[in-house]
Amino acid sequence: MIRHIVMWKLKESAEGASRAENAAKLKEKLEGCRGIVPGILHLEVGLAEPGFESTYDVVLVSDFADKAALDAYQVHPVHLALKGFAGAVRESRDCVDYVV
């Protein structure tokens, strides 16, 4: 199993919306990726909570059956569409993939 974790720090404002609005929209788009390809075992999205010490605004934690499933997810049209939005609203992004 492959665990895929991605974290985004968002711009204060972008695409005509605030950081909080874009975080909610990115969360919705990411959650729309559940089940788009066979082999997605788990997908959860979290938003940083006010009052906690956070360096990122949005986190994706997902598990894939194998690298082939992760590769299929990466090129799926739904995922590619959300990558365009994420690129427009993000200040930075970090990712790690590892075998569980």
Image (cartoon, grey):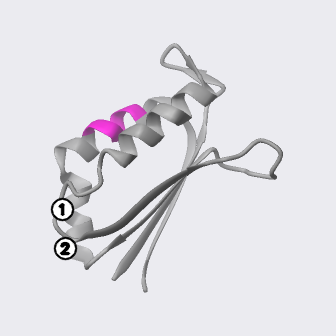
- The picture places residue 26, in percent across and down from the top left corner, at 45, 37
Crowding near the residue tagged with mark 1, few <14, some 14–19, many ≥20 C-alpha atoms within 10 Å: some
Residue beneath the point at 55% across and 18% down: 17
Q: Quadrant of residue 86?
A: top left
Instruction: Work out whether residue 46 or residue 16 is closer to the camera in this orientation and state it.
Output: 46
Q: Quadrant of the N terminus?
A: bottom left
Q: Quadrant of the C terminus?
A: bottom left
* Magenta segment boundaries in residue numbering: 81-85
Look at the magenta stretch and give its main secondary structure.
Answer: helix
Residue 93 as seen in the image, left or right of residue 84: right
Element type at mark 2:
helix
Relative to 91, is 8 above or below? below
Q: Quadrant of residue 81?
A: top left
Cα–Cα gap, marks 2 and 1: 6 Å
Left or right of residue 86, residue 51 in this image = right
Q: Which residue is mark 1?
A: 72
Q: Secondary structure at mark 1?
A: helix
User: Is 67 above or below relative to 95?
Assistant: below
Q: What residue is at 80 percent from the left and 51 percent from the top? A: 52
Q: Is 39 within the magenta? A: no
Is residue 27 found left or right of 55 in the rendered image?
Answer: left
State whether residue 41 is above or below residue 92. Answer: below
Q: Amino acid at mark 1?
A: Ala
Amino acid on which disc 2 is placed: Ala
Q: Which residue is mark 2?
A: 68
Of residues 52 and 10, which is closer to you in this image?
52
Lateral position of residue 92 relative to residue 1, left or right: right
Q: Position of residue 79 (x, y in %)?
A: 27, 46
Q: Are marks 2 and 1 in contact (CB under 8 Å)?
A: yes
